[in-house]
């Protein structure tokens, strides 16, 4: 059974759906390896311009596969080299939109936070409950959460194993948008389609500059932004976009 189902709902958009419903899409080593393969493949596919990642209505992903972790030690955890799996998502050049319904807990919350945009259904629940198991997040759960919601909300969630509803997560800055009912996937696909219709090189530069700028001081980040903005003036898509704007035409972008 494929643990990650792949679909192409609209032009230039890939939809990845976690497929372990019997385990609430718990992130087993095999599932994470499949995700790595798909993200590496799609990142290198010039026909794909945005990726939607989702689970099902009960769970986006309800954490790591605890059964695979009970009897192992630090050496075996290190030998799994799980960072390669997460790096494939973190370094993906295409915008990633997470569509979250149901539980996004532990590794599932970390997986959602690897995305560039998070769309949540009203029933979504976010949390990092690792402390209950005598462990802590190991795939960015402390570092990405504090950057998204601030020290005090992050500490409360991490140290008490507390959760946030979709609305609470939106108010805290963890979620980009909350939608009614079961509309998270449809909304995420709509956003992905909008992004995919934009000039691909401009989209790529915006994503890379924003992420890189978060890790450096403001002056260096502004210089990086200026350089990238100037370079885009050499692209054919920039000429196409500006000409179409002046002539009130609908442009088609080549990614060059």
Image (cartoon, grey):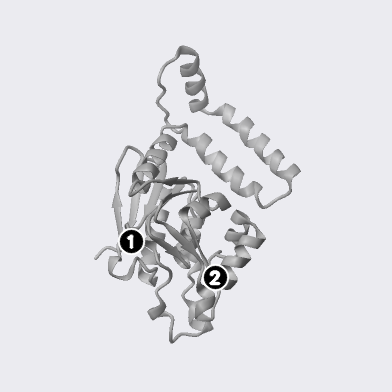
* Foreground tag (2 vs 1): 1
Answer with mark 2 or mark 1, whichever residue precedes in sequence.
1
Determine whether, in the image, residue 160 is placed left or right of residue 254.
right
Judging by the rendered image, the residue that carries numbered circle 1 is 58
Determine whether, in the image, residue 39 is placed left or right of residue 226.
left
Residue 195 in the image: x percent, y percent?
44, 37
Judging by the rendered image, the residue that carries numbered circle 2 is 138
- Residue ranking furthest to the right: 219
Secondary structure at numbered mark 1:
loop
Residue 68 in the image: x percent, y percent?
39, 79
Q: Is residue 46 above or below residue 90?
A: above
Q: Is residue 115 above or below residue 196?
A: below
- The residue drawn where x is 36% and y is 39% is 12
Q: CA distance from mark 2 to mark 1?
A: 24 Å
| Residue in the foreground of this view, choosing between 111 and 174 | 174
Judge the density around disc 1: few (<14), some (14-19), many (≥20) Cα neighbours within 10 Å.
Answer: some
């Amino acid at each position: 059974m494929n643990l990650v189902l792949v679909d192409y709902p609209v032009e230039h958009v890939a939809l990845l759906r976690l497929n372990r419903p019997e385990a609430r899409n718990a992130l087993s080593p095999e599932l994470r390896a499949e995700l790595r393969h798909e993200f590496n493949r799609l990142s290198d596919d010039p026909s794909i311009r945005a990726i939607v990642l989702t689970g099902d209505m009960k769970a986006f992903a309800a954490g790591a596969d605890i059964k695979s972790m009970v009897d192992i030690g630090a050496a075996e955890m290190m030998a799994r080299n799980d960072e390669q799996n997460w790096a494939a998502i973190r370094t993906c050049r295409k915008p990633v939109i997470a569509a979250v319904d149901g539980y996004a807990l532990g590794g599932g919350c970390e997986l959602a936070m690897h995305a560039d945009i998070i769309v949540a259904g009203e029933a979504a629940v976010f949390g990092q409950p690792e402390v209950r198991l005598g462990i802590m997040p190991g795939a960015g759960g402390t570092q990405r959460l504090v950057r998204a919601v601030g020290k005090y909300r992050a500490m409360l969630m991490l140290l008490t194993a507390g959760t946030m509803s979709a609305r609470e997560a939106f108010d805290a800055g963890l979620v980009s948008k909350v939608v009614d009912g079961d509309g998270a996937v449809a909304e995420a696909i709509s956003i992905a389609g909008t992004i995919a219709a934009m000039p691909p090189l401009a989209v790529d530069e915006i994503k890379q500059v924003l992420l890189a700028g978060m890790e450096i001081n403001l002056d260096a980040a502004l210089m990086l932004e200026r350089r990238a903005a100037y370079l885009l003036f050499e692209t054919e898509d920039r000429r196409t976009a500006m000409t179409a704007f002046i002539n009130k035409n609908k442009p088609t972008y080549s990614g060059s």
